[in-house]
Amino acid sequence: MANREQPYDPYIPATGEAPNAGAQGQNGNHRTAALQAEIDSTVGIMRDNINKVSERGARLDTLQDKTDNLAQSAQGFRRGANRVRKQMWWKDMKMRMCLIVGIIILLLVIIVPTVVATQK
């Protein structure tokens, strides 16, 4: 009963029954260790990628917020610029009207006395 065979389990390394079994078992262990190291490396890279994606998402959210703020600021600036443009247009119109009225008064001051003097 001491020589009773265990059922085959691929996850448990075979204990050397044949002369080459020890070398193959060691080779299998090294291969398993290399595969495990490669898997661990891949998992690490995947974790880094996931962290980078989440950071990128956070940066995109802040960029979206900044874009929205900039759009609101631009709209406010546009309104303010239109208001200032209208104010300056009215100011320019007032100045033109004042100049026209001033020229008319000046002409009246010159022409009326001249016409009155020539009629006498």
Image: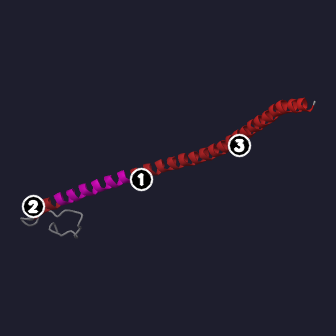
Dot 1 amino acid type: Val
| Element at label 1 | helix
The reply, left or right, for residue 42 in relation to residue 63 is: left
Check disc 1 and report the residue beneath it. 53
Q: Residue furthest left?
A: 19
Q: Earlier in the sequence, mark 1 or mark 3?
A: 1
Q: Looking at the rendering, which quadrant does residue 96 occupy?
A: top right
Residue at the image position 14 percent from the left and 68 percent from the top = 3
* Residue, disc 2: 23
Tag 3: amino acid: Lys
Q: What residue is at 81 percent from the left and 36 percent from the top? A: 104
Q: Which residues are magenta?
A: 29-49
Residue 98, horizontal then vertical, whole percent: 78, 35
Is 36 a magenta residue? yes
Q: Nearer the viewer, mark 3 or mark 2?
A: 3
Residue 86 image label:
3
Neighbour tally class for label 3: few under 14, some 14-19, many 20 plus, Cα within 10 Å: few
Q: CA distance from mark 3 to mark 2?
A: 93 Å
- Disc on the earlier residue, 1 or 2: 2
The one nearer the camera, 118 or 23, is: 118
Instruction: Identify which residue is drawn at 15% across, 66% down.
Output: 2
Left or right: where 41 falls relative to 5: right
Residue type at tag 2: Ala
Which residue is most to the right? 120
Q: Nearer the viewer, mark 1 or mark 2?
A: 1
10 Å crowding of disc 2: few (<14), some (14-19), many (20+): few
Tag 1 near tag 2, CB within 8 Å: no
Disc 1 from disc 2: Cα separation: 45 Å
